[in-house]
Image (cartoon, rainbow, N blue to C red):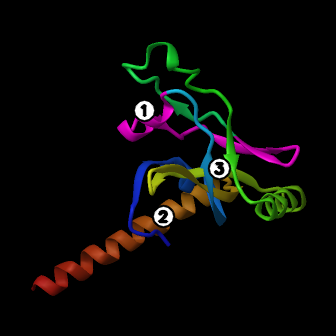
Amino acid sequence: MRNKGVKVISKNRKAFHDYEIEDQFEAGIVLTGTEIKSIRKGSVNLRDAYARIDRGEVFLLGMHISPFEQGNRYNVDPIRTRKLLMHRKEIDKLAGLIKTRGLTLIPLDLHLRNGFAKVQLGLARGKKLYDKRATAAKRDAERMIQRKLKEQNYR
């Protein structure tokens, strides 16, 4: 899915643990001041971030971009709400899915594509505690199978 010229800056590992991802979308971010310099440095945290559609526009809330050290007065609030850039058809499709199926928009990763910061959004449904346990058990079982196969191949 990713092209050349794409550098992943930050991943939201918790998203795959807490949510079942149904679909993915890419969106640009409106940045101000020295935020792009902090992103290139890797000073980003997506853990508690989520996206919301308000009046036909998509906004990313809760993403923390640390202030750039040499930025002085050009630094902005690290947890401010940031506007995301998407096509109108994509936004309308997302709004419909969120309303009818009770899904959530969460950021999966932040990456640079051709010098521009982009967010990979996931259309997600929250997992229950027993779903998380089942996923962990399945992952452990697959890991054990791979380990046994590897041991057999070396004998």
Rendered view: 63 above or below 148: above
Residue 137's disc is 2
Residue for point 39% across, 40% down = 40
Kindly state the secondary structure of the residue where label 1 is placed: helix
Observer-nearest residue: 125 or 50? 50
Task: Look at discs 1 and 3 and give the one toward the viewer.
Answer: 1
Rendered view: 98 above or below 142: above
Mark before the other along the chain sequence, 1 or 2:
1
Observer-nearest residue: 25 or 74? 74
Observer-nearest residue: 122 or 56? 56
Residue 106's disc is 3
Observer-nearest residue: 155 or 8? 8
Kindly state the secondary structure of the residue where label 3 is placed: strand
Residue 64's disc is none
**Residue, disc 1:** 38
Q: Residue 39 vs residue 29: left or right?
A: left
Identify the residue at the far top of this view: 73
| Amino acid on which the number 1 mark rests in the picture | Ser
Q: Are marks 2 and 3 in contact (CB under 8 Å)?
A: no
Task: Look at discs 2 and 3 and give the one toward the viewer.
Answer: 3
- Residue 138 in picture, x, y percent from top left: 48, 69
Q: Residue 61 vs residue 135: left or right?
A: right
Q: Which residues are magenta?
A: 34-59
